[in-house]
Image (cartoon, rainbow, N blue to C red):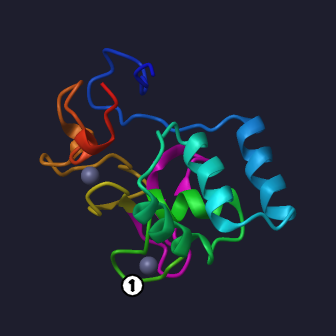
Amino acid sequence: MGKKKHGKSGVGSKPPEWRPDEFTRARIERLRAEGAPHEEVLRAGLHALGAPEMPPDLLRELAGMMRNAKSGEEFADSIFIGDCPFCGFEKATNCEDEPGIENPMVGYCPACKALFCSECRTRMTREKSECANPDCWFNAPEGTPYPGSEHFRDD
Ligand SMILES: [Zn+2]
Ligand SMILES: [Zn+2]
């Protein structure tokens, strides 16, 4: 299997962007509509994220998270964004479609209106929707492996 390339090279501190194509989104939605088993939907979801096959244990664990998701987007948010680090609200979303931010790696909490870094949970503001934490992976030099990603390498 080939390596997945994230983002463009040479853009320094810009976080990598995750943009599933329309086909992938549609596929996840269709599986859901058909009432496919969660694991199956999950597989499609992970494929959409460019993830290789997961160990069955991890798959089951993730499938548990999936049960609460109403759409592929919600599921992706539950993985990439997670709960609001400030008020604990469980359905924080990403800011891919948020005017002026348009960054899927920025989390937004509809409950307390917080903006935060999806990686290190540092609070952000609308004026400065970049992670200010120097230790955050988003601010690491280009090519720094994602922490824990060695488990998923296939080379
Ligand atoms: Zn919140
Ligand atoms: Zn961060």
Instruction: Examine the rendered structure and indicate whether residue 61 appears above or below residue 15.
Output: below
Q: Residue furthest left?
A: 135
**Residue 98 visible in this rendered orientation of the protein:** no
Instruction: Examine the rendered structure and indicate whether residue 68 appears above or below residue 120.
Output: below
Residue 149, quarter of the rendered image:
top left
Q: Horizontal and vertical percent for residue 18?
A: 51, 38
Residue 49, quarter of the rendered image:
top right
Q: Residue at the location (59% across, 70% down)?
A: 66
Q: Dot 1: few (<14), some (14–19), or many (≥20) neighbours within 10 Å?
A: few
Q: Horizontal and vertical percent for residue 25?
A: 73, 46
- Tell me, yes or no, whether the highlighted magenta stretch contains residue 103: yes
Position of residue 3 in the picture relative to residue 25 (left or right): left
Q: Residue at the location (78% across, 46% down)?
A: 27
Q: Is mark 1 within 8 Å of ligand 1?
A: yes
Q: In this picture, which residue range is highlighted in magenta?
A: 92-115
Instruction: Examine the rendered structure and indicate whether residue 87 appears above or below residue 134.
Output: below
Q: Residue at the location (29% across, 63% down)?
A: 121
Q: Nearer the viewer, residue 54 or 33?
A: 54
Give the quadrant of the C terminus: top left
Q: Residue furthest right?
A: 34
Circle 1 residue: 87
Label 1 SS: loop
Mark 1 residue type: Cys
- Tell me, yes or no, whether the highlighted magenta stretch contains residue 94: yes
**Residue 41 visible in this rendered orientation of the protein:** yes
Give the quadrant of the N terminus: top left
